């Protein structure tokens, strides 16, 4: 029996220039990522499409004094992924090889850390036939092979701190969390100065927090209450706390990708009403956000790192059977109840840049993961799995079995969810 057709979703790889503050470090993570792309080539006959669901590259994880890199600079720093000269020979790179194997069926959906990436940037990725990934300009994407049954989005649009903010920042929509992440990079520099030479952000346990800063949950809940009462400015409160923690003052200057420079005081002034701005944006798409969007975005997505509420709404309002997201860096298999959302399944890809200590941890071990959805036309079901790459014994490959048991759901009608028999 031929293999069932399937869709593969990667997200949150966070490839940078391999600066010490980057979560993704070529020396650590590249073998895992190359193994995932090799799997794509091996399974190409059954893969209908590879969708990158945001944050393929990272233009955020750089300290304020460092100008974030362009897409071309990131690509040049990682030729085995994007193509270039390696050992004196020009190669198409893993992305180019995937494009060839899938005959061009690769799609790029932007996240928050790569929201500045343009279609022209994506066109720099090419296979030997000159094909490039399809660049999606909207936050939601429906893979054609699923015929409306599957929708994917990075997930940052549901974060109060990370959602594009074209109201307060009409120039480029960069959200306030960009500056939180830049401050986190500065904090990383300070921590790495206490560690052995050659240490990077990937040497720090817990590296890769999606907001860029592990804000205390209780503090965020208290902040929400204060915001509702109009007593505090979110940007002022958070930036003030980060400046104090890193020993900086309000004249700290951020060098931006577009060539502009902003002080911390400028940033606070530029984002006077993060909550109101988010709610104004959400009010224009009520079917996607629902009521109390701002409160839920802060109290669930940012404080609890959970997209469950919005995934369920997206599934039920648009009648999709499977909703695939990224952003949280947590594959849903680590929290089984997240999969069960009535008439739809929520799948999260996790991420591909866990820190070295987290990959070796005995408790809550982190893996480089991605999502795979099989399309069972005979049984009229979607089968969702979280796959992971293992590097045990120095051999890197996609593990033969998923991280946990797959889940499946009817393609149409009531969302009967089950665990397929082995």
Image: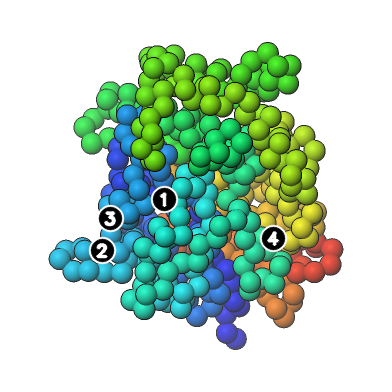
Q: Badge 1 is on which residue?
A: 57
- The first of marks 2 and 4 along the sequence is 2
Mark 3, residues whose alpha carbon is within 10 Å: few (<14), some, or many (≥20)? some
- Check if mark 4's residue and mark 1's residue have beta carbons within 8 Å: no
Mark 2, residues whose alpha carbon is within 10 Å: few (<14), some, or many (≥20)? some
> Disc number at residue 310?
none
- The first of marks 4 and 3 along the sequence is 3
- The first of marks 1 and 3 along the sequence is 1
In the image, what residue occupies the spot 37% across and 52% down? 71
In the image, what residue occupies the spot 80% across and 58% down? 343
Q: CA distance from mark 2 to mark 1?
A: 17 Å
Q: Secondary structure at mark 3?
A: helix
Which one is nearer the viewer's eye here, 353 or 21? 21
Q: Answer above or below: position of 266 versus 55.
A: above
**Residue 24 rendering spot, x and y as whole percentages:** 37, 46
Q: From this viewpoint, which residue is outermost toward the left?
A: 88
Q: Secondary structure at mark 4?
A: strand
**Residue 220 rendering spot, x and y as whole percentages:** 62, 23
- The first of marks 2 and 3 along the sequence is 3
Q: CA distance from mark 2 to mark 4?
A: 37 Å
- The first of marks 4 and 1 along the sequence is 1
Q: Answer above or below: position of 261 versus 363.
A: above
Q: Badge 3 is on which residue?
A: 76
Q: CA distance from mark 4 to mark 1?
A: 25 Å
**Residue 61 rendering spot, x and y as whole percentages:** 40, 38
Q: Quadrant of the C terminus?
A: bottom right
**Residue 231 rendering spot, x and y as whole percentages:** 68, 13
- The first of marks 2 and 1 along the sequence is 1
Q: Badge 2 is on which residue?
A: 84
- Check if mark 2's residue and mark 4's residue have beta carbons within 8 Å: no
Q: Secondary structure at mark 2?
A: strand
Whether residue 236 appears in this view of the structure is: yes
């Amino acid at each position: 029996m031929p293999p069932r057709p399937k869709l593969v979703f990667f997200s949150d790889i966070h490839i940078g220039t391999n600066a010490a503050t980057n979560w993704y470090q070529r020396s650590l993570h590249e073998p895992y990522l190359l193994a995932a792309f090799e799997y794509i080539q091996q399974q190409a006959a059954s893969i209908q499409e590879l969708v990158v669901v945001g944050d393929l590259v990272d233009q955020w994880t750089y300290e304020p004094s460092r100008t974030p890199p362009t897409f071309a600079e990131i690509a040049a720093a990682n030729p085995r992924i994007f193509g270039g000269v390696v050992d004196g020979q020009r190669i198409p790179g893993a992305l180019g090889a995937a494009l060839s194997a899938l005959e061009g069926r690769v799609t790029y959906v932007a996240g928050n850390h790569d929201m500045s990436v343009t279609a022209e940037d994506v066109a720099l990725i090419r296979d030997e036939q000159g094909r490039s990934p399809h660049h999606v300009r909207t936050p939601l994407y429906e893979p054609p092979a699923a015929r409306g049954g599957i929708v994917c989005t990075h997930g940052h649009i549901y974060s109060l701190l990370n959602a594009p903010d074209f109201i307060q920042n009409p120039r480029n929509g960069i959200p306030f969390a960009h500056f939180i992440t830049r401050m986190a990079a500065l904090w990383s520099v300070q921590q790495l100065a206490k560690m052995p030479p050659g240490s990077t952000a990937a040497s720090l346990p817990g590296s890769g927090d999606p907001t860029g800063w592990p804000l205390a949950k209780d503090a965020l809940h208290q902040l929400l209450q204060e915001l509702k009462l109009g007593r505090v400015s979110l940007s002022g409160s958070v930036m003030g706390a980060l400046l104090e923690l890193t020993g900086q003052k309000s004249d700290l200057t951020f060098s931006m990708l577009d060539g502009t420079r902003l002080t911390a005081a400028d940033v606070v002034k530029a984002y006077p009403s993060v909550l109101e701005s988010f709610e104004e944006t959400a009010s224009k798409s009520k079917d996607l956000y629902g009521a109390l969007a701002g409160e839920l975005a802060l109290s669930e997505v940012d404080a609890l790192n959970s997209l469950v509420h919005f995934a369920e709404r997206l599934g039920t309002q648009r009648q999709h059977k499977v909703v695939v997201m990224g952003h949280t860096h947590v594959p849903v298999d680590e929290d089984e109840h997240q999969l069960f959302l009535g008439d739809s399944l929520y799948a999260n890809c996790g991420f591909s840049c866990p820190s070295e200590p987290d990959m070796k941890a005995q408790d809550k071990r982190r893996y480089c993961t991605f999502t795979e959805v099989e399309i069972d036309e005979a049984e009229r079901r979607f089968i969702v799995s979280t796959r992971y790459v293992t590097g045990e014994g120095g051999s890197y490959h996609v593990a033969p079995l998923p991280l946990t048991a797959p889940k499946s759901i009817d393609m149409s009608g009531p969302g009967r969810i089950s665990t397929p028999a082995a």
